[in-house]
Image: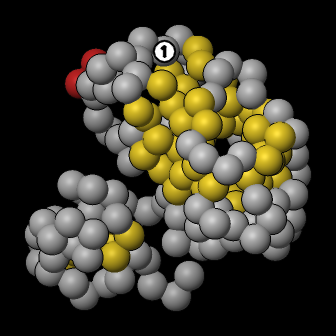
């Protein structure tokens, strides 16, 4: 990436550098020392040797101060089940986009769309939604056409990349 996108602290929308307000919600973007404060995406290249390990957005915040969304008792993760970085865990937040560019979780898979799918917490349950991707989203080898509830152990395929949805009390 030539310049880091600025993530809105209010809605999570990725904004190009130089904006004072978020394109997604209109709220002011945080300023720290006169410069925009970016929250980088988690990124991994599953087909190459490049591995960019970006600190988690809540890095430095004590675990006891991070409030989980209501209705969720256990942490939820997507675990990478294919490629060079198999086993890598992505802790899920309330709403995340997965894709090969301009996404919260970036996977360098040429068969994955730029913004392939979103995982959202709705009424205490995580759901996955295909975002009109060229190669579709599959849950347990079934192509999905609408938001689909996820349960522990579900297998998710986006492009050539496979994940497992996991809920656990441990990280």
What percent of the width, then of the height, locates residue 132?
A: 63, 66
Instruction: Give the left or right position of residue 37, taking residue 13 as reference.
Output: left
Identified at 72% across, 46% down, the residue is 144
Residue 60 appears in which quarter of the rendering? top left
* Residue sitting farthest toward the front: 145
Is residue 87 visible in the rendered image? The answer is: no
Relative to 112, say whether 104 is above or below.
Answer: above
Residue 109 appears in which quarter of the rendering? bottom right
Residue 62 appears in which quarter of the rendering? top left
Identified at 13% across, 66% down, the residue is 27
What percent of the width, then of the height, locates residue 65?
A: 23, 24
Relative to 36, say whether 92 is above or below.
Answer: above
Judging from the image, what secondary structure is the residue with disc 1 in? loop
Q: Which residue is mark 1?
A: 74
Relative to 5, say whether 99 is above or below.
Answer: above
Identified at 30% across, 20% down, the residue is 70
Counting other residues with Cα less than 10 Å from the Cα at mark 1, is it few (<14), some (14-19), or many (20 or more)?
few
What percent of the width, then of the height, locates residue 29?
A: 17, 69
Of the 4 image quadrants, the one containing the C terminus is top right
């Amino acid at each position: 990436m030539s310049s880091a996108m600025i993530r809105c602290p209010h809605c999570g929308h990725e904004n190009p550098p130089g904006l004072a307000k978020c394109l997604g919600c209109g709220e002011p973007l945080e300023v720290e020392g006169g410069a925009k404060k970016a929250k980088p995406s988690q990124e991994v290249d599953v087909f190459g040797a490049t591995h960019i390990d970006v600190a988690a957005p809540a890095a430095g915040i004590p675990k006891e101060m991070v409030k989980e969304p209501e209705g969720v008792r256990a942490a939820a993760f997507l675990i990478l089940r294919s490629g060079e970085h198999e086993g890598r865990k992505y802790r899920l937040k309330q709403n995340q986009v997965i894709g090969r560019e301009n996404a919260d979780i970036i996977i360098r898979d040429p068969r994955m769309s730029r913004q392939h799918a979103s995982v959202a917490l709705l009424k205490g349950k995580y759901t996955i939604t295909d975002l009109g991707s060229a190669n579709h989203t599959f849950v347990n080898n079934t192509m999905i056409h609408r938001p689909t509830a996820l349960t522990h152990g579900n297998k998710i395929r986006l492009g050539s990349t496979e994940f497992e949805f996991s809920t656990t009390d441990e990280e």
